[in-house]
Image (spheres, rainbow, N blue to C red):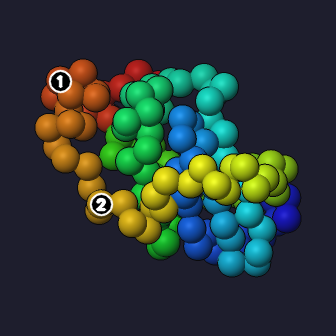
Amino acid sequence: MAWGDPVTPDLVRATWLGGHRIHLEFKDGCSGILDMGNRRWRGVFEPLRDVALFRQFRLEREWNTISWPTGADLAPEFLYEQASNNPATEVDLGRGHASAEEAPERADDASLAAALGGTRSASDAES
């Protein structure tokens, strides 16, 4: 499936692999790695440079994506493309830590505020 396809299969699991890497699994059997390690971090994504905050993603079944306490999320089509183009290896799968479906519903407000540099909200981040 590629950009522009009308329907992206359901995202059924997202497992943090360490660093800025997440293993994604889709209902159609597609699975692979989202690696955000070499991305430019701007706007609501800026705080996600901190791995402790990055790993607090959660699976948003209603929107078929993952999101973070900062308000950041990624397009389902982008996630599917990343999984399709970056298959997981046995080594990757052995590194899984905790899946998003096991993650808490929301981050602790104090730790989120500290990660965001005080009481600044995600909407205050520079675009």
Residue at 56% from the left image edge and 54% from the top image edge: 96
Q: In the image, is residue 81 above or below residue 54? A: below
Q: Dot 2, crowdedness within 10 Å: few (<14), some or many (≥20)?
A: few
Residue 66 is marked as none
Q: Earlier in the sequence, mark 2 or mark 1?
A: 2
The residue closer to the viewer here, 121 or 92, is 92
The residue tagged 1 is: 118
x and y percentages locating residue 28 in the rendered image? 76, 78
Residue 104 is marked as 2
- Circles 2, 1 touching at the beta carbon (< 8 Å): no
| Circle 2: residue type | Pro
The residue closer to the viewer here, 86 or 73, is 86
Residue at 41% from the left image edge and 21% from the top image edge: 126
Q: Quadrant of the N terminus?
A: bottom right
Q: In the image, is residue 98 above or below residue 55? A: below
Instruction: Using the rendered view, name the quadrant where residue 83 is placed.
Output: bottom right
x and y percentages locating residue 43 in the rendered image? 45, 27
Label 2 element class: loop
| Circle 1: residue type | Gly
The residue closer to the viewer here, 90 or 8, is 90
Query: Does residue 22 appear in the picture of this structure?
Result: no
